[in-house]
Structure formats: C-alpha cells, structure tokens
C-alpha cells in the first residue's frame, strides 16, 4: 500500500498546553482513514495542523507531516499554495463558510481551476458541468449561474466536493462533512465519498464522531482521546477487537 500522508510525532500547543501530543498516523492511497474521538479530543486541530490552517494562537512544536514523502511543514509558501487546493483538499462541516456569496458557482469553479490549470472558459465550464453531474446535482447548467446563498447546505456540500473532484485532488480531508446535513443529504455525501475512492483512488481522511459513518466508509480507523491517538487499526479489528479502554467504551455505548 502506498503511503500518501504520514503524520510523525506531531505535537501542537496552545501556549504551553499540548492540544495534540505526539501524533503518529498513516493514510494510504485509495483508502479512507476514519478519525473518531469525543468532542474536544483534537480532531479538527489535527486537520488544521495538516492543512497548515491552525488558528494563530496554536502552533506546531514538533513533528512532521509528510505528503508523498515531502514534509509539508518545510515547503515554501508558494509551493504550499500550489499543493493546497490542488492535491490536498479540505471539506468542511459548514460548506457555506467556504464560499464567497457574491460570486456564482461558475465563478468558484473558474477561480479554482484557473489557479492550477491553463484552460479556456469553455473548457472550465465543461469540467464544472461534468463535476456537478458526478455529484448528482440536478440541472447543472442552471446551477452554475446560482449564488451560494441560493443553495441548501446539502447542495453546497456537494458543490464543494465537486470543486475538489474538478481539480482531481488526491487527498481529501473531510472534517465532519455530514454533521450539519439532514439524513438524506448525509447518505448522499457518504455515497459520494465511496464513489471518489473507487473511481479516483484518492485518499480520504474522514473526521467523524459517528460510528455509523466509520462502519460505512472507513478502511482504517484512528481513535483520538485527549489529544492523542490511542488506537489505530483496520476497520474490522476496530469493531471486532478494540484494544484501548476508550474504544471499548465507545463501542459498548453503541450497543446500548
Ligand atoms: N478557540 C479555541 N480556543 C482555545 N482552545 C481551543 C479552541 N479551539 C480548540 N481548542 C482546544 O483544542 C482542543 C481540541 O479541539 P478540537 O476542536 O480539535 O476538538 P474536536 O475533537 O475537533 O472537537 P469537536 O468534535 O467538538 O469538533 C480543545 O479541547 C481545546 O482545548
């Protein structure tokens, strides 16, 4: 299995306090790594540390983040801008925040594509239409002329995924991507991630607090507890033979 992302001995602090302590994690090509843990255990901070979008009051005090062997913490700002959005794509819990509400959906596609490829307007429109069809959004031609505020949260989430698919991202970091959605939209977004994995061989790091999502999508699972990874296993061992007391408690709670 090809290692796409490796987090090595990563510690993140706020002031003197450890928020993440010595995190070690590996995500493989074409596989979904589910990250589960209670609220406040550090799941979002881990995503932000990987994407280098930590809030200003938090900092990496030690460790490495390797993407295809290259240490992201050492690459230049220019190179990192080229990576982010092109190879690594972050899918947020609240998609609304990721859009500029005075720009149409077509402008968002254009801006994203222009940043990474040399394409004509016609080519960009075609790529956008294909991506919107892939995420099963109805009437894609019409949708391109809409503004983000005209779409529901579920639709925006799918547009955000379509934007990542349009640039053929190879690593998706999805932080609770279904939490803000209703059951039907949740199901659709999970199906999409399955589709991305099988059609593009992308790697997906999927943060969730929902064991159902882990069961449905994850190939590998990492369990976070108080800023540490306390267990990492393939999904079958995770459910059949949990090792850490917190994981056992988590699974028992599901049985009740
Ligand atoms: N705005 C903030 N100010 C100060 N400390 C913060 C802030 N946001 C997060 N933290 C600290 O970082 C820790 C990890 O937070 P993080 O948001 O990564 O947890 P999480 O596992 O993603 O939680 P949730 O599932 O609720 O989103 C928290 O326990 C808290 O100590």
Image: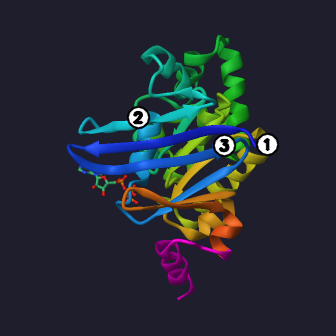
Name the quadrant where ligand 1 sits: bottom left
Asked whether, in this view, residue 191 is left or right of residue 144, the answer is right
- Give the main secondary structure, helix, strand or loop, of the magenta stretch: helix
- Residue 50 can be seen in this image: yes
Q: Is residue 150 part of the magenta span, yes or no?
A: no
Q: Are marks 2 and 1 in contact (CB under 8 Å)?
A: no
Q: Residue at x 65, y 57 (%)?
A: 220
Asked whether, in this view, residue 40 is left or right of residue 94, the answer is left
Q: Which residue is mark 2?
A: 101
Which SS class for mark 1?
helix
Q: Magenta residues, as a range?
A: 240-256
- Residue 149 can be seen in this image: no
Asked whether, in this view, residue 199 is left or right of residue 62, the answer is right
Return the residue nearer the eye: 141 or 232.
232
Residues at marks 3 and 2, CA–CA distance in whole angstroms:
29 Å
Residues at marks 3 and 1, CA–CA distance in whole angstroms:
11 Å
């Amino acid at each position: 299995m090809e290692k796409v992302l490796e987090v090595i001995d990563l510690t993140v602090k706020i002031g003197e306090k450890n928020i993440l302590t010595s995190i070690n994690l590996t995500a493989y090509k074409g596989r979904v790594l589910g990250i589960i843990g209670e609220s406040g255990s550090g799941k979002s901070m881990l995503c932000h540390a990987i994407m280098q979008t930590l809030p200003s009051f938090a900092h990496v005090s030690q460790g490495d983040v390797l993407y295809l062997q290259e240490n992201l913490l050492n690459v230049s700002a220019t190179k990192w801008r080229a990576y982010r959005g092109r190879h690594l794509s972050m899918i947020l819990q609240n998609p609304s925040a990721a859009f500029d509400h005075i720009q149409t959906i077509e402008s968002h596609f254009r801006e994203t594509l222009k940043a990474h490829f040399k394409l004509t307007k016609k080519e960009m429109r075609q790529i956008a239409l294909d991506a919107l069809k892939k995420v099963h959004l109805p009437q894609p031609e019409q949708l391109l002329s809409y503004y983000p505020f005209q779409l529901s949260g579920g639709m925006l989430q799918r547009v955000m995924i379509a934007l990542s698919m349009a640039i053929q991202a190879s690593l998706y970091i999805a932080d609770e991507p279904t939490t803000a959605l209703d059951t039907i939209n949740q199901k659709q977004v999970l199906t999409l991630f399955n589709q991305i994995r099988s059609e593009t061989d992308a790697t997906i790091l999927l943060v969730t607090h929902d064991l159902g999502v882990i069961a449905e999508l994850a190939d590998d699972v990492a369990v976070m507890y108080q800023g540490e990874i306390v267990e990492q296993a393939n999904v079958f061992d995770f459910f059949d033979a949990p090792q850490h007391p917190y994981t056992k408690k988590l699974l028992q709670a599901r049985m009740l």
